[in-house]
Image: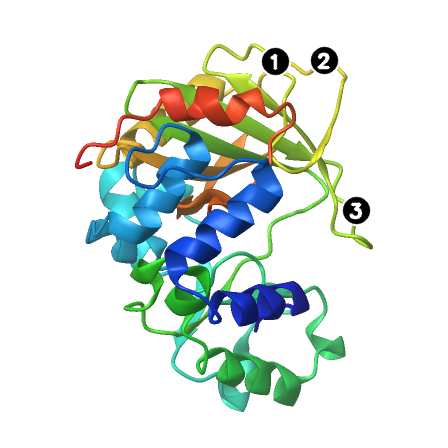
Amino acid sequence: MLTTKQKINYFFMKLMPKKLYIKLRVFILQGYIPNLKNPKTYTEKLQWRKLKDDNKLFSICADKYAVREYVKNKVGEEYLVPIYLITDTLTKEEFEKLPNSFVLKTTNGSGNSAVKIIKDKKLANYEELRDFFEDCKKIDVGDYTMESWYSSIPCKVMAEKLLDTKTVDDYKIHCFNSGKMIIEHLTERNKETGTLKSNAYNENWKKLNFTMGTELYTYDLKPPKNFEKMKEIAKKLSEDFDYVRVDLYNIDGNIYFGELTFCDAGGFGTFDPKIWDSKLGSYWEIKNN
């Protein structure tokens, strides 16, 4: 389902040509008009990808179910979150067979707009959940995100294990074909507002003191004990792409795969300080530009 903000953005996107919409929105968010013919910044290259890159692997790896086979072949299935169900339509019988807590999501979802976290099934309304995910089928995710690879992903409903959110550490590892890695560590998620804090580190766990749309935390943090293993996993999962964001969870020393993201924040993220838009862009050499 689309959020109110997504609906507003989609409304304005449909009023104008895609390139004009992109240029206006980037100008509003970043303060400059993006060069889509010869992209240099990270934002420009993400927008170029949306308009020009037709890598067939994007659809496979953005599919929340199909990507599991890709991950299994690359690094092993031990890093996959266990799943309970994959189905076209969530039936009452299937719902009743699920454990007391789980996560429901669509296989073609982008962001958290098509995710439902069920902590206590006894408090959940099956009919509402069924209708929610049936409504999700009516949305062309690739259309409203301008990330065309989502359009060819079948919309199925997947139920997976609910990870222990009390001990989870969330890492978004931006992998560039220059060999550079930028690791976003996300923490202190506010359940009421949805806000969180983060900081960025390089591949040697040097704190970089910049954020990509979140509040900066200023305290020092040691790398996880299995940091080298996390980097190894991210490197293997990113080797087929000139840039991809590899999301990993770390729970009590156990690493779990989250997702592969090919257009972070839809290409409309913000940087503080802004110089990092150019720095990240310099780490990424577009192969087929």
Mark 1 crowd level (few <14, some 14–19, many ≥20, 10 Å Cα) = some
Q: How many marks?
A: 3
Q: Looking at numbered disc 3 in the image, what kind of residue is underneath it?
A: Asn
Q: Are discs 3 and 1 less than 8 Å apart at CB? A: no
- Residue at point 48% right, 39% down? 33
**Quarter of the figure with the N terminus:** bottom right
- Image spot of residue 288 (x, y percent): 17, 37
- Image spot of residue 16 (x, y percent): 45, 66
Please tell me whether residue 130 is drawn above or below residue 211 in the rendered image: below
Label whose residue precedes the other's in the sequence (3 or 1): 3
Q: Quickly name the residue at label 2.
A: 220
Point out which mark residue 190 bears.
Answer: 3
Point out which mark residue 207 bears.
Answer: 1
- Residue at point 37% right, 20% down? 282
Work out whether residue 41 or residue 208 is closer to the camera in this orientation and state it: 41
Q: Looking at numbered disc 1 in the image, what kind of residue is underneath it?
A: Lys
Work out whether residue 282 or residue 262 is closer to the camera in this orientation and state it: 282
Q: Is residue 178 visible?
A: yes
Mark 2 crowd level (few <14, some 14–19, many ≥20, 10 Å Cα) = few
Q: How far is the residue under mark 2 from the one under mark 3?
A: 20 Å
Q: Looking at numbered disc 2 in the image, what kind of residue is underneath it?
A: Asp
- Image spot of residue 88 (x, y percent): 38, 81
Q: Are discs 2 and 1 less than 8 Å apart at CB? A: yes
Point out which mark residue 228 bears.
Answer: none
- Which of labels 2 and 1 is toward the front? 1
- Residue at point 80% right, 53% down? 193
